[in-house]
Amino acid sequence: MVRRVSVWLSLYMNDLPVLEKTQSAFVQLTRYAFFGVVSNSLGYLAYFLLTYLGATPKITMTVLYGVGAAIGYIGNRNVTFAHKGSLLGSGVRYFITHFIGYFINLVILIIFIDRLGYAHQWVQAIAVFVVAGFLFIAFKFFVFTNLDELKGNRL
């Protein structure tokens, strides 16, 4: 019995780093979701208003995407992921990631609005969630990693 408890405790203690990483990922996802809901709601309202006033969906999405990405870098770096690595390195990776995210969003609009004829309001609303999922994964594992610290780069 003592041996079983000892084995269980050693297994449990070895899993603590995994548990901490899981809790950390959950906290990051929660923060990302909270800030994402707030910023994307405001962005979507701006998108809806501007397209209602006559702006084209793709140009409106392009402008708002750029503004949201610029503001989002500060929040994601400092709050969501609490990144302490290179500002330049994470900034370049952030730009690359958002370029891909923008391209995903644009392709979704082209396919579902231009080719299939769906209403742009619904397509953009769904695209926000698709791109947000991609961005969270890319931010966590590519943009705001500790690669800079491991390499010894501190810009």
Image: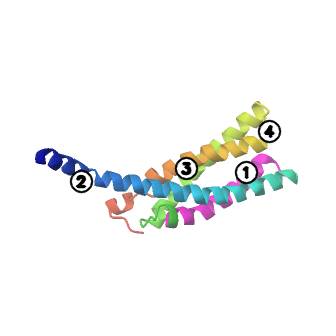
Residue 112, above or below 102: above
Residue shown at 32% from the left, 51% from the top: 18
**Pointers 4 and 3 in contact (CB under 8 A)?**
no
> Element type at marker 2?
helix
Mark 3 lies on a secondary structure that is: helix
Of all residues, the one furthest to the right in this rendering is 53
User: Which span is picked out in magenta?
Assistant: 55-78
Q: Which residue is depicted at the point 46% across and 61% down?
A: 89
Which residue is identified by label 4?
Answer: 119
Give percent across and percent down for residue 104: 62, 42
Is 30 or 55 nearer to us in this picture?
Answer: 30
Residue type at the position of mark 4: Ala
Q: Residue 61: which disc?
A: 1
For this rendering, which residue is in front, 102 or 126? Answer: 126
Residue at the extreme top = 116
> Spatial distance from mark 2 to mark 1, Cα to Cα?
48 Å
Image spot of residue 128 (x, y percent) = 65, 47
Q: Is 66 part of what is drawn in magenta?
A: yes
Neighbourhood count class around disc 2 (C-alpha, 10 Å): few under 14, some 14–19, many 20 upward: few
Question: Label 2 is placed on what type of residue?
Answer: Met
The kind of residue tagged 1 is Met
Badge 1 local density, few (<14 within 10 Å), some, or many (20+)? many
Look at 56% across and 46% down and name the residue there: 133
Determine contact: label 3, label 2, CB under 8 Å: no
* Circle 3 residue: 135
Q: Describe residue 21's horizontal placement relative to residue 58 as left or right.
A: left
The label number, if any, that marks residue 13 in the structure image: 2
Quadrant housing the C terminus: bottom left
Contact between labelled residues 3 and 1, with CB atoms less than 8 Å apart: no
Along the horizontal axis of the image, is 66 left or right of 83? Answer: right
Question: Helix or strand or loop: what does disc 1 sit on?
Answer: helix
